[in-house]
Image (cartoon, coloured by chain):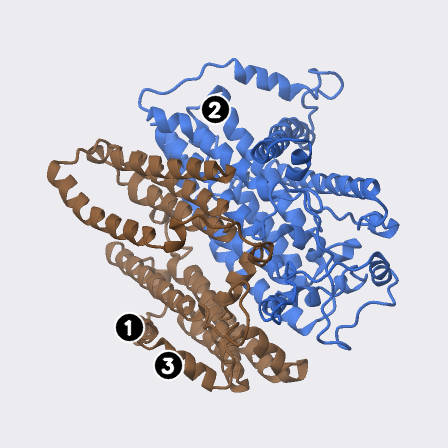
Amino acid sequence: MVEAFAEWGLPIWAAHLTAALAKAFLLLNVVAVGTLVFIWMERKVSARIQDRLGPTRVGGKFGWLQSVADGVKLLTKEDVTPATADPLLYKLAPYVSFSAAFAAYIALPFSAGWSAVAMNCAAFYVLAVLGLEVFGVILGGYASGSKWSLFGAMREAAQVVSYEAPLALCVVIPAYLCGSMDLHVIGEMQAGWFTNWLIFHDPFTFVVFWVYFTCAVASVNRAPFDLAEAESELVAGFHTEYSGLRWSLFYMAEYGSMTLVSGLAAILFFGGWNGPIPIFHLLGWADGSAGEGLHFVALLFGAVNFLLKCTLGVIAMMWLRWSLPRLRIDQVLTTCLKYCIPIAAVCFVGATLWDLFGAPFVNDLAPHPYGTRANVRERWTDAGTVALRPAGAPLSSGLPPAPSADSMAAASFDGATRPDAAAEPNRRAELPTIRRIR
Amino acid sequence: MDWSFLVFLFFASLTCGFALAALLAQNVVRMAFFLILSLGASSGLFFLAGAEFIGAMQLMIYVGGTLVLLVFGVMLTASDAAVTMRSSVSDWFFACVPSGAIFIVLASSALAVPRWNERQPAPSPEFVAAANDQTSRLGLALLGLRLEPGEEGPAAGARAGYLFPFEIVSIHLLVALVGAAHLARAKRRAITPLPESIAAQPAMPAWYRYLFNVLGALAASKTALYLFAPQTLFETAVAYGAPPSVASELTTLNLSFEHWRLPGAAAVAVVALGLALLRFHKVSGLFVETLGFMIVIVQFWYWGATATAQMAAVSWLGLTMLLTAAFFALPERRQPVAEVVV
């Protein structure tokens, strides 16, 4: 993207600035518009679950402008600061929460190569930044100068230390199976039919997805883990004293991180931007050999796939919220520490052994377009060959050269020509270089 | 002027400004808040330098760690004296002398790096391409295979890497964790009488308390060895027949399922037994479990894969840490809720 702006005649700093602003604008719209849509959806979903109609008036048939009406109402509310509050921290807390949720989107890919920043430790970065969102919650709860808020903040703190460990352990397993923390690589490794998705890699990854989902729900403060707000006990928990725009920033952070953890789940376990049926791989559009325009269409549909999977994840969280009662704080700690951690640890060992022995599972039903995953993963030993190369040899980027379109097509969906790992133990399957928008 | 210099100035001034604000603030919670902002801004500096993994680590460890500090150390203990802190002149003096000394040492050693004083030519594309794969090189270095970009000849790949410090840190953390759990547990027992259902459980065996001493001595001796005789240790490892690289070890061993069947089945059986035992008697369960992992590690050692055995030991430690946290640090489920949290 920077190069494109530079070609238009902008100086390099202006090109960088314009590219950064454009990406920030796009991501901000994902969070803000996403929040508006999801709040409307939450109303409709909860209404249907409770056998009601939900909003029907504003904006016509389904009340689809209800969120805009809510937004206008929030804008016109008075911005109150309690007398006992610490004014500086009280006013800053919502921004801390929102910017943490927003910053995590920087590394999230929306389609093959479509992310604001291509980061080789994207999964870890997203986890690290996601953990900072609670900072705003705790700060807001403390700075409000209210007992209800402080109770909410303390519960949140206790909850944080319990869910972060199992959540990280769940993310380790897909990262291990793909040999990379780069979300682009993890997504591309699941290309092909839906049987190639990592949730179907072995029974342990299937189990660990549910552990991930549990911890993810806890990490975004949604029922049944919404102890920090607990409106039946703590008035509104940490945001009791907030009103108007600051309150809505907390809400945007919550919905933004809901979308984020769903997107992470989609990439780690459900193939990311790869649809259940690899239409564009079969047509040959996905690798760019059929021309730039068709490749762009394939990428665009990848983004649509990804957003659909995100939405499904968010709907599942809404379904949970309106179906399950809230847990007590000790039940939350027990769930996360005494059940999720051991289950995730056992699944980690199990998935490792399953992969080591190469035991068959759903993943082996359809061939993977880029060869067996283990061969691709073991590419990390190639880093040694990069450094040990003979003097004067050209230094590539570390990735093997991208295969030609013919060999890709031959290796992908014939089924018969699947590369056999046992026959050639040292063969390194070739992962096509992922195109990135800079 | 380079455009990235402006971004550097931005993050650097944020870091320094918030650090100053943390110094000058009088409210202890605000201090912690500014400290977190300062640490977060310095992670921006890492991202600017292209060290994404270190930047994310900074966010995870320092910012996240300070967050916990803020919550448990500051918010819960903040009384009126801490909300408006007035430092006396003597406080300032005794704070300024050591921190000023450290600052002078740091600044002088930073300015002594000769490369930073003169203007460097832009790095070659080859160097940038090799440096692009930062994270995996860092990971390899943590597992004992350290590579420098553009390094050639017989020296390449023959560095020791950071496996050993990594392992030592793990042991230290394990000792700290077990010790903290032990302290917290003993305290609670002393204050409140336990329900009968828990008091009836078998007491901690007498040898168990020596576990802390043994682990601590192990960590201390390993640290001493690493500090005073790193070369000897490394040469011993190489003398066992293993090159310092996990990757080449595993490829030369060329293990197949046949190799793994017996030790693998034994290890899995013992680990499963340990997990089952954990349900009834935690200490012996954990002990049996470590035995299962020891089988794997000894097997690797027997095959001559020293570095791999070390790697397995590290991962075993990690898993034991998690299990220790899960089974020891937590109070019993049957205990009254009010004691557990808030």
* Residue name at image x 45 percent, y 73 percent: B160
Residue at x 71%, y 53% (from the top left corner): A188
Residue at position x 66%, y 41% in the image:
A316
Residue A259 image label? none
Is residue B304 found left or right of B112 in the rendered image? right
Q: Colour of chain B?
A: brown
Residue A282 located left or right of residue A226: right
Q: Which residue is mark 1?
A: B213
Which mark is in front, 2 or 3? Answer: 3
The answer to whether marks 2 and 3 sit on the same chain is no
User: Which of A41/A324 is in front?
Assistant: A41
Colour blue belongs to chain: A
Q: Of helix, strand and loop, which one carries label 2?
A: helix
Going by the numbered disc 2, the residue's amino acid type is Arg
Locate the C terminus of chain A by quadrant.
top right
- Chain holding disc 3: B
Quadrant of the rendered structure where residue A380 is? bottom right
Q: Is any part of residue A324 visible from this angle?
A: no
Chain of the residue where label 2 is placed in the rendered structure: A
Q: Is residue A3 visible?
A: yes
- Chain letter of disc 1 in the image: B
Q: Work out whether B75 lies above or below B55.
A: above
B77 or A30: nearer the viewer? A30
Residue B94 position (above or below residue A208): above
Distance (Cα) linking label 3 and label 1: 26 Å
Mark 3 highlights which residue? B232
Corner quadrant of residue A412 = bottom right
Q: Position of residue A34 (x, y in %)?
A: 64, 31
Residue that carries the numbered disc 2 in the rendered image:
A246
